[in-house]
Image: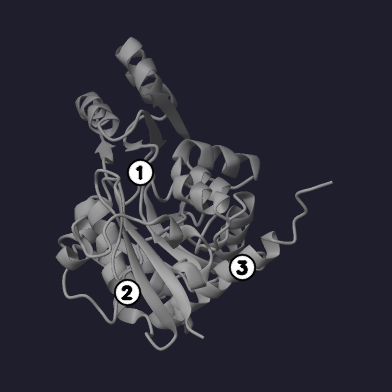
Amino acid sequence: MKTKLGLLYGGKSAEHQVSLQTAMAVIKALDVNKFDIYPIYITVEGQWLKGPQLQGPVNSVKELAFSSDQEEGALAPAIFSGKTGNGGMDVIFPLLHGPNGEDGTVQGLLELLNLPYVGNGVLASSAGMDKVIMKNIFAEAGLAQVDYTSFIRSEWEADKEGAYEKVEKQLGYPCFVKPANLGSSVGISKCRNREELEQAFKEAFLFDRKVIIEVGVKAREIEVGVLGNDAPEVSVAGEIVPKKDFYDYKAKYEDGNTALIIPADIDKETYTRIHDMAIKAFKALDCAGLVRADFFLTENGTVLINEINTMPGFTPFSMFPLLWKHTGVEYPELIEKLVNLALERHTEKQSIKHTF
């Protein structure tokens, strides 16, 4: 019997278009002999729409961003009933990046509906989305990382000069200013002086009410993929070599102005440290399914964890799938593994007793 798979994509997020690219790639890779595929589109306004069952790949993003006058119309409650004979899904694959999708909100809904879903749960998703909370947990777990500080918008507005002085005193230049709750390098700025710092704060606060500022380090950017539930496995390591000053949104998704080197040219001892730290970070946040773990490797050989991404870029040309391809897991197999991990974790949760 085929698995009824609901693909959840789009979303009320600045990363809406990235999600559509991901959905197109997954649909193309899915084996229609194994899966009945149902698109579930969330518009940029937050409206949920269900399209008809897909019979094969779509040709454009426009086909994925269907409107409410589709034959199926607005999302019916039966899609989330969990009863496959009543139009429900066997498992949901959230292909959502950023807030309102990767941050635990959708995962919480799926938990309440008792539906299996691919990827990380509520805690890991929300903590992994908020870079400040994530780094606080990493610090508690004893993971080495760069120095950082953070501000919420009201603190900054109340004393902008004090905020800038704190950054200069604690971190100095260069430093990076980032929205705390956004991925795909959106809203990130590198600052070399006060003028750039002031502009970076303004830019980052356009995308979030909280910002994080990190000390700039001269280091190589090394990434690994983590796959699994309670016994996660780690891929080979890859290296990002931006041709620009740093790996921003445009370099990731638009101009391809970045070299991805897989496997990374690192020695066995360094890989072992990265491997162990990736698993430690995965377990510290109680992750499940998939994570991309990003590290800095400094000139003196120090390994620092930068962040984890609980729903990394997932086209065949994104780092996470490429890492697993070089480890021996092709893209279609990777998708099937994630679906199986989702079902495995859901089955384990059903053993939890809810009465006494």
Alpha carbons under labels 2 and 3: distance apart: 33 Å
Snapshot quadrant of residue 69: bottom left
Against 245, residue 264 (above or below) is: below
Task: From the image, tell me which residue sits under label 1.
Answer: 182
Against 232, residue 353 (above or below) is: above
Q: Is residue 106 left or right of residue 271?
A: left
Residue 304 locus on image (x, y percent): 50, 50
In the depicted view, which residue is nearer to us: 240 or 32?
32
Which residue is at a point 36% across and 70% down the rendered structure image?
38
Task: From the image, tell me which residue sits under label 3.
Answer: 232
Task: From the image, tell me which residue sits under label 2.
Answer: 53
* Residue type, numbered disc 2: Gln
Snapshot quadrant of residue 240: bottom left
Residue 86 locus on image (x, y percent): 48, 68
Q: Earlier in the sequence, mark 2 or mark 1?
A: 2
Q: Earlier in the sequence, mark 1 or mark 3?
A: 1
